Image: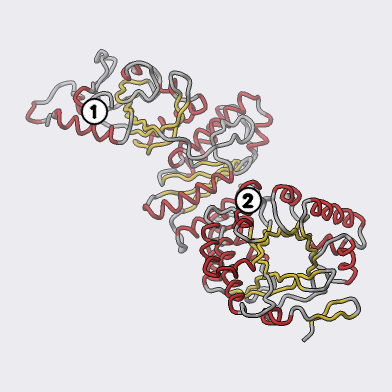
Amino acid sequence: MAQNADALPLRPATPAAEAPPRGVERRAAKPAPAAARPQPTGRDRDRFVGFAFAAADLLIETDPKGTILFAAGARCRLTQHDVASLVGSGLHEHVAPTDRKYLDVLLKRIVDKTRIKPARVVFQGFDGHRFPALLGGCRLESCPGSLFLTVLLASGPRHEAPAVGPGAAGQLLDNHTFTAILEDRIVQAREKGLDNGLTLLLIEGLQGMVDTMPEGAAAEVRQGIDAYLRGISADGDSAGQLGADRFGIVHTADVDGDEVQTHIADIIKEAGGDLQGGIRSWSLDMADSQLDAADAARALVYTVQAFASAQGGEFTIASLEDGAQRMLSDAVDRIGRARATIEKRDFFVVYQPIVDLESGDVHHLEALTRLEGMPSPADFITFAEDVGLIYDFDLLLTQSVLDTLKAYHLEPKLPDVAINLSAKTLMSPLFLRQFQAVTEPYGDLARKLLLEVTETVVVSDIGTLNDVLQKLRSAGFRICLDDVGAGSTSFQSLYGLQVDYAKIDGKFVRGAAGNPRDMAMLRSMVDVCLQLDLTLIGEQVEEPDHARLLNELRVTLGQGYLFGRPSRDFAYFAKDWSKMARKGGAVLWKS
């Protein structure tokens, strides 16, 4: 600090009529007798100033419109001169243009709510350089006409906020980033006892309305909504645009849904907009859940994603009043059951052979999960991916297969085993460390695993996923890319991911014999994979013709009912998998 507390002027050097006294120095029009009113000492004043500067780099007093009446502390690059030179200027002049509407919202909230917690604001230095800082503030009943603000320099924006939609100010979080911060905020709220809430906002017909408005008016609407939602969000960085007309806000408990709807309607009206739909909000309690903090966060994120992607009346003005809460309750229930399935290990593993199409020998087995009472685990796996439980499930599957391999490790024909790992699991920052912790106790036996990457979720960052896969390959694990041809990113993945095997989606294998289009796709995929020096596996080989076709196309491995159905009997494969006979072109296992 450039000045000590005794040297700090508590008022600017301006005439009394223009700058009324501040804080404890303020005097009534007719002073009361000294004995009737305690007088603040210099020590008291120093304490107040010390407390303020302990939490901030700069203290500012403004009027409700933002005109600076007093400033003390660090210059924070806002001026080349003494910090007192800020007096008389408008605070808006020192804030980045994209944040000026947002500043209006913050100042108004101080007037309306008495106090706001520090919120992230982008300031603009005297040299044009922009930097983030936390702006907090309050007003005092004893000092009408004044707002008292603190500025604390921040290290940088917590999240990059891409522009969303025409005329957007570019400050609201996108869907992905909002859900990420939502998980963090829910866990924090639980751990610290914070009273935060989550509001989902639907402005039905917003996109269509702004598309028909003049450019300036459309920008007013977009920027006004942007600024307001940021202003009411926790720390000023917890509001996101989830779709063209859908928004999510993490906020403190004093935010009211009706107030939000009214304010949004006023923004649209002032810009001359005519919203054909309506405005609805759903408030969800971030703390009220029978789940632990992490799973409660998953339930809320799942609900937000459902809200963002809902179609055809699931979340419309005419929908049920309890629509969002009902969906959240369902998510809480399903997560609870999924968590119980994982913790109680209410699943079992079956094994299916992958065969060398030339020799008929088994090359390796694939471990497939089955849930008690469910014909297929597909719904469970998809839901586990959606809510982030697939990570725990994949690690548990890895351990289960390794335990089986360990139990049969003395068998001379112990097969290698492929396990499915979700791309979402592999993208987790904690995965490599946790995977190493699971596999390390098994030593070289762990290298019997072949890791099959499933793309049931869209991989948004191929480069990061490839980095993880190369670390696994350098540790001795072989990698297979599953279901090539099934997903929209599969060809992109083939080029972007360095792997050892590629498994061709079974619908092309089954359809190629009678469908020229499927045959063309199959040939194309095979050619690409061979050029990338990948070993190919054909799925769903059910007829001898399927096997012959794949063999002719230089696909070396096959998997399907022709060679055997999934079985829980790992001991059979460990002891006898090399003993096979052929009958009528089909491969049969000797019993």
Residue at image mark 2: 465
| Percent of width and height locating residue 532 | 77, 51
Residue 189 lies left or right of residue 220; in this view the side is left
Q: Which mark is residue 139?
A: none
- The residue furthest bottom is 591
Specify which label sits upstream in the sequence, 2 or 1. Answer: 1
Q: What residue is shown at x 7% (from left), y 30% (from top)?
A: 35
Q: What residue is shown at x 84% (from left), y 60% (from top)?
A: 508
Q: What residue is shown at x 56% (from left), y 58% (from top)?
A: 388
Foreground pick, 277 / 200: 200
Amino acid type, label 1: Gly
Residue 532 lies left or right of residue 141; in this view the side is right
Residue 171 in sight from this viewpoint: yes
Gap between marks 2 and 1, in whole Å?
57 Å
Q: Is residue 312 above or below residue 346?
A: above
Residue at image mark 1: 23
For the N terminus, the quadrant is top left
For the C terminus, the quadrant is bottom right
Amino acid type, label 2: Leu
Q: What residue is shown at x 86% (from left), y 63% (from top)?
A: 550
| Label 1 Cα neighbours within 10 Å, binned few <14 / some 14-19 / many ≥20 | some
Foreground pick, 291 / 26: 291
| Percent of width and height locating residue 525 | 82, 54
| Percent of width and height locating residue 504 | 79, 60
| Percent of width and height locating residue 445 | 60, 70
Q: Is residue 13 above or below residue 508?
A: above
> Helix or strand or loop: what does disc 1 sit on?
helix
Q: Mark 2, mark 1: which one is toward the viewer?
A: 2
> Helix or strand or loop: what does disc 2 sit on?
helix
- The residue furthest left is 35
Q: Quadrant of residue 469?
A: bottom right
